[in-house]
Image (spheres, grey):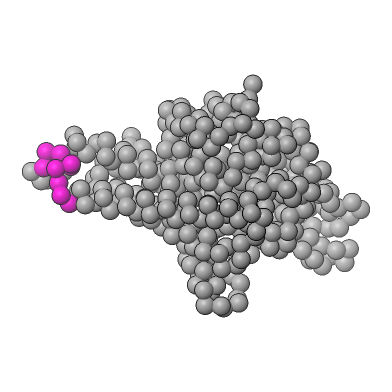
């Protein structure tokens, strides 16, 4: 039996995630080797109700909010970055699914409140207009959780009967009609199974389509506009939730290095332990401050998203741009903090037996995800602050 999603508090959800950390650490090496989340871990996530954070209460989901999704992901990342990343994507794609018309939501969550929805927003497909919808052919890379997903949200350009593109949209497709091409051979986040999805002339009905330009401005096709969480700002929430795993990876790195400092000497010095060294103390403090800074920016941005949604107010463009910048700034600080900790701990950080090297690789790979690019985010925010109208990305 699942815990009662409708009465579960955010603190309880985070506590459940924290309780799973030993299991995630136990299976982290296997996740890397198999390039997927091990079944015992996936089963534990389902049993804890953690796949329902983005699911509406109408389907016995948590309808949890931005801050809750981030904090749960961060707690899981202290155990395994890949597991946290996959859960993050499943939950934010469940939120995306909840923006579609109810007919589509019923197909996904009505059949299974624990439905696992993966996603790739790049419109790397072609479509052909037919009666009742479109026929879709395409390939979508970096589809995290592809080996466990039951549905996927993918980007598609919609065409009219003349074949001309009339909209950039998201399509909701069942995995039973897609194939997975095994392409995920990477340096970090190996356990995410972020493979390529392939559609070959798949039928897409009208009710499983959502316009991206409309969604960016807060115009969602769901008939339940009374549900605050599903009024959240589109671009900001998609980017910001991806910072959750990074926060947890930063905390995990800091705790590991701290735990060893009282017994590990500083190589080629007279210091019997790292904790005695002033330079080491300074490095630990600098890393901790960067991790704290990342948390402050992410939590401020999450509060802005959640509070605006609760009031039924869609944030203006400059506020949305600032959330994008908050996200990039936070992730830069986490990756910088982990680099400091790797150097402070010493060459042993890079041993295959050390969890630090996996944390370092996972964080570095995740930081390159396109939606959270710091350089793009800063440019978006800078243009907004200066009143420059040029748009360089739709996800703001």
- Above or below 377: residue 208: above
Find residue 151 and report its horizontal and vertical position in percent: 70, 41
Does residue 40 show up? yes
Does residue 83 show up? no
Q: Quadrant of the C terminus?
A: bottom right
Of residues 150 and 176, the one nearer the viewer is 150
Total residue callouts: 0
Is 275 a magenta residue? Answer: yes
Find residue 253 and report its horizontal and vertical position in percent: 34, 42
Residue under the point 80% across and 66% down = 166
Give the farthest residue toward the right. Answer: 131
- Above or below 265: residue 221: below
Give the farthest residue toward the left. Answer: 270
Which residues fall within the magenta stretch? 271-279
In screen coordinates, is 304 left or right of 179? left
Where, by quadrant of the figure, is residue 63 drawn?
top right
Of residues 166 and 194, the one nearer the viewer is 166
Where, by quadrant of the figure, is residue 316 drawn?
bottom right
Give the farthest residue toward the front. Answer: 311
Residue under the point 27% across and 36% down = 259
Find residue 357 and report its horizontal and vertical position in percent: 35, 43
Residue under the point 21% across and 52% down = 282
Q: Quadrant of the N terminus?
A: top right
Of residues 327 and 218, the one nearer the viewer is 218
Where, by quadrant of the figure, is residue 128 drawn?
bottom right
Residue under the point 81% across and 62% down = 159
Is 358 a magenta residue? Answer: no
In screen coordinates, is 387 left or right of 115? left
Give the farthest residue toward the top. Answer: 1
In screen coordinates, is 369 left or right of 61? left
Find residue 39 and report its horizontal and vertical position in percent: 56, 27
């Amino acid at each position: 039996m699942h815990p009662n999603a409708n009465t579960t508090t955010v603190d309880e959800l985070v506590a459940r995630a924290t309780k799973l950390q030993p299991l995630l650490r136990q299976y982290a090496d296997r996740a890397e080797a198999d390039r997927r989340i091990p079944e015992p871990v996936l089963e534990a996530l389902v049993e804890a109700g953690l796949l329902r954070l983005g699911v509406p209460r109408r389907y016995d989901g948590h309808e949890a909010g931005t801050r809750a999704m981030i904090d749960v992901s961060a707690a899981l990342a202290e155990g395994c970055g890949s597991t946290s990343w996959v859960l993050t994507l499943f939950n934010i794609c469940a939120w995306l699914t909840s923006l579609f018309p109810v007919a589509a939501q019923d197909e996904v969550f009505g059949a299974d409140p624990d439905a696992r929805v993966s996603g790739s927003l790049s419109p790397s497909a072609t479509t052909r207009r037919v009666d009742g919808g479109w026929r879709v052919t395409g390939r979508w890379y970096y589809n995290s959780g592809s080996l466990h997903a039951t549905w996927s949200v993918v980007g598609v350009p919609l065409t009219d009967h003349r074949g001309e593109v009339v909209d950039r949209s998201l399509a909701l497709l069942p995995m039973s009609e897609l194939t997975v091409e095994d392409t995920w051979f990477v340096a970090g986040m190996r356990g995410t199974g972020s493979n390529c999805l392939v559609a070959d002339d798949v039928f897409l009905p009208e009710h499983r389509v959502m316009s991206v330009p409309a969604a960016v401005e807060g115009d969602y096709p769901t008939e339940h506009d009374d549900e605050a969480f599903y009024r959240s700002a589109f671009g900001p929430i998609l980017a910001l939730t991806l910072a959750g795993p990074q926060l947890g990876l930063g905390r995990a790195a800091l705790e590991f290095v701290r735990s060893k400092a009282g017994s590990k000497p500083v190589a080629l010095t007279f210091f019997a332990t790292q904790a005695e060294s002033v330079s080491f103390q300074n490095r630990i403090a600098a890393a901790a401050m960067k991790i704290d800074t990342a948390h402050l920016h992410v939590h401020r941005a999450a509060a802005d998203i959640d509070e605006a949604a609760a009031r039924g107010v869609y944030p203006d463009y400059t506020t949305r741009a600032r959330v994008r910048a908050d996200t990039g700034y936070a992730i830069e600080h986490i990756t910088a903090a982990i680099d400091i900790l790797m150097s402070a701990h010493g060459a042993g950080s890079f041993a295959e037996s050390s969890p630090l090297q996996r944390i370092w690789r996972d964080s570095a790979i995740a930081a390159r995800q396109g939606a959270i690019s710091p350089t793009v985010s800063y440019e978006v925010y800078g243009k907004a602050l200066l009143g420059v109208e040029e748009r360089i990305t739709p996800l703001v």
